[in-house]
């Protein structure tokens, strides 16, 4: 992330905005008893989720961020330093997998697809994937100068999730702003 991006994502203002949106982001989804969050970054989404789910595990690729989160959550959340495209979890370990505003940081479509495949693998039968991210726009591209930005194409999400094995796929988006989607691992 570039410096401006780091400042925003680690700010109290960003954390407050995420906390205000999180109940809506997961409303209507039965996340079950064991939720995996992919890519918590500085932890704004983790802070917002921890009070909404019975048990939360977060996997973070950046070692320094994972260390900071481990200190902050001190056992209330299981923080794992690792790659969402090659997760160190058992098959069917989680009732739900969530990822919020992080997939655009994954440098290639193939790596994003590997994350979808891994999410499918670690979900229990009937488990849900819930995700949201920003869409490409001129301001979003400007914000990511010198930064990784591989925004999702809303049209491609359905076939990519189907290829990973998911069913009951739902994709919605706010044009030029964001995409949100959900899917299930078949029973």
Image: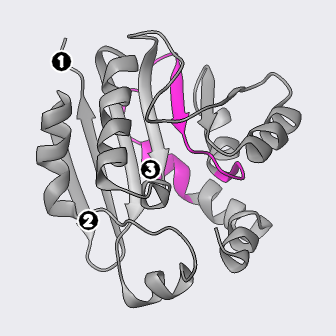
Are the residues at dot 1 and dot 2 in contact (C-beta closer than 8 Å)? no
Label placed on residue 186: 1
Q: Quick one: 28 or 122, which is closer to the camera?
A: 122
Q: Is residue 186 magenta?
A: no
* In this view, 25 is above or below 121: below
Question: Mark 3 Cα within 10 Å, few/some/many (few <14, many 20+)?
Answer: some
Left or right side of 25 for 73: right
Q: Position of residue 180 (x, y in %)?
A: 32, 55
Q: How is the image coloured?
A: one colour
Magenta part of the chain:
21-44
Q: Mark 3 points at which residue?
A: 25
Q: Nearer the viewer, mark 1 or mark 3?
A: 1
Give the mark, 1 or 3, whose residue is nearer the N terminus.
Answer: 3
Q: Where is residue 186 in the image (x, y as percent from the top left)?
A: 18, 18
Question: Mark 2 Cα within 10 Å, few/some/many (few <14, many 20+)?
Answer: some
Give the mark, 1 or 2, whose residue is nearer the N terminus.
Answer: 2
Give the SS element for disc 2: strand
Q: Which residue is drawn at 52% across and 18% down?
A: 34
Q: Mark 2 points at which residue?
A: 173
Q: How many labels does the image show?
A: 3
* Distance of label 1 from label 3 (alpha carbons): 22 Å
* Distance of label 2 from label 3 (alpha carbons): 13 Å
Q: Which residue is drawn at 14% across and 47% down?
A: 158
């Amino acid at each position: 992330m570039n410096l401006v991006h780091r400042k925003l994502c680690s700010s109290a203002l960003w954390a407050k905005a995420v906390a205000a949106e999180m109940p809506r982001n997961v409303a209507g989804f039965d996340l079950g008893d064991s939720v995996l969050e992919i890519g918590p970054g500085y932890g704004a989404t983790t802070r917002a989720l921890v009070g909404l789910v019975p048990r939360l595990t977060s996997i973070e690729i950046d070692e320094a961020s994972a260390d900071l989160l481990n200190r902050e959550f001190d056992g209330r959340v299981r923080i794992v330093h690792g790659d969402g495209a090659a997760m160190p979890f058992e098959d069917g370990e989680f009732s739900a997998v969530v990822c919020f505003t992080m997939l655009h940081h994954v440098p290639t479509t193939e790596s994003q697809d590997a994350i979808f495949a891994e999410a499918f693998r670690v979900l229990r039968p009937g488990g849900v994937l819930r995700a949201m991210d920003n869409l490409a726009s001129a301001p979003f591209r400007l914000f990511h100068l010198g930064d990784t930005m591989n925004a999702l194409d809303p049209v491609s999400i359905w076939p990519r999730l189907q290829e990973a094995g998911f069913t009951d796929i739902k994709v919605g988006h706010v044009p030029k702003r964001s995409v949100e989607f959900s899917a299930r691992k078949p029973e």
